[in-house]
Image (cartoon, helix red, strand yellow):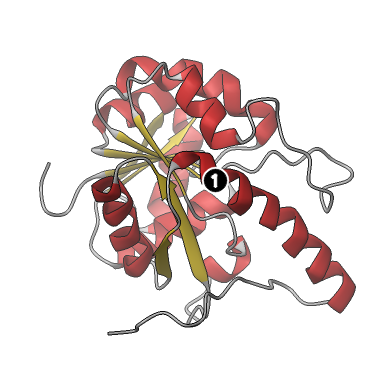
């Protein structure tokens, strides 16, 4: 893999995916937007400054790192679609198992988390890392500084480090949060933050870990 990997964002036409794509493209990464509709993906790529758009399978095949930014309802089907194309790659899963209408209530799947469900569904062929759950998508789509941390969970510390580098490129601070099983905490916190946003009538409360050595 090159020093600056090509990033394939599956679900890249959505709010979170397009926000990340915009920031990574501005940081100099080659970004491929993946969608079930290749024409829609290509149109989105042109507006975001991404390299190109493609159907999900083609995007996953072309990316060095694959970023999954899809709703929980589509999670399993899209994992099945990209599985043949992600063997040996880092797959960053941003999915939160939200079940409308009660999205401010933590509702976790039998596998304990979406990320663990993804690892199981991919059959160990890819290295799943969970991240980017706690950042408001609308904020990613602006140029404002982001005072928000990203909990990064994965079984290989070097894979986590690669994702932390991508967080920094997007203007965020990534924090090593342990193995993939810990993703349950990061995913659950998203529902808590949704509830906080509603109660305090704010557009995007985030997470900040204190006490870290900034050096």
- Would residue 101 be found to the left or right of residue 41 on screen? right
Q: Decide if residue 48 is in sight here.
A: yes
Q: Which residue is drawn at 69% across and 50% down?
A: 188
Pick the front one: 94 or 16: 94
Pick the front one: 131 or 9: 131
| Residue 61 rendering spot, x and y as whole percentages | 28, 26
Pick the front one: 125 or 14: 125
- Would residue 55 be found to the left or right of residue 104 on screen? left
- Would residue 91 be found to the left or right of residue 14 on screen? left
| Total numbered badges shown on the rendered structure | 1
Q: Name the residue under label 1.
A: 183
| Residue 211 rendering spot, x and y as whole percentages | 47, 83
Q: Residue at x 54, y 45 (%)?
A: 183
Identify whether 82 is placed above or below 171. above
| Residue 182 rendering spot, x and y as whole percentages | 53, 46
Identify whether 189 is placed above or below 211. above
Pick the front one: 8 or 184: 184
| Residue 154 rendering spot, x and y as whole percentages | 40, 43
Q: Which residue is drawn at 25% across and 31% down?
A: 62
Instruction: Residue 161: name its quadrant.
Output: bottom left
Image quadrant where one finds the C terminus: bottom left
Identify whether 14 is placed above or below 135. above
Image quadrant where one finds the N terminus: top left
- Would residue 78 be found to the left or right of residue 158 on screen? right
Instruction: Residue 66: name its quadrant.
Output: top left
Mark 1: few/some/many CA within 10 Å (<14, 14-19, 20+): many
Q: Decide if residue 36 is in sight here.
A: no
Identify whether 160 is placed above or below 98. below
Instruction: Residue 54: name its quadrant.
Output: top left
Which element carries disc 1, helix, strand or loop?
helix
Q: Residue at x 42, y 26 (%)?
A: 55
């Amino acid at each position: 893999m090159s020093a600056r990997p090509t990033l394939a964002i599956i679900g890249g036409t959505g709010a979170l995916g397009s926000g990340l794509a915009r920031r990574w493209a501005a940081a100099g990464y080659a970004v491929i937007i993946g969608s079930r509709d290749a024409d829609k993906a290509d149109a989105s790529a042109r507006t975001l400054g991404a390299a190109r758009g493609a159907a999900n399978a083609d995007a996953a095949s072309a990316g060095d790192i694959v970023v999954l930014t899809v709703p929980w309802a589509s999670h399993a089907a899209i994992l099945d679609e990209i599985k043949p194309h992600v063997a040996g790659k880092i797959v960053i899963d941003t999915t939160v198992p939200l079940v409308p209408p009660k999205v401010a209530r933590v509702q976790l799947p039998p596998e304990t988390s979406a990320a663990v469900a993804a690892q199981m569904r991919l059959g160990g062929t890819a290295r799943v890392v969970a991240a980017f759950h706690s950042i408001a998508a609308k904020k990613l789509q602006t140029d404002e500084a982001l005072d928000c941390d990203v909990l990064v969970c994965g079984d290989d510390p070097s894979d986590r480090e690669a994702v932390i580098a991508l967080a920094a490129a997007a203007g965020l601070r990534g924090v090593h949060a342990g193995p993939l099983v810990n993703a349950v905490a990061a995913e659950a916190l998203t529902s808590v933050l949704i509830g906080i946003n509603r109660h305090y009538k704010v557009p995007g409360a985030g997470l900040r870990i204190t006490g870290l050595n900034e050096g």
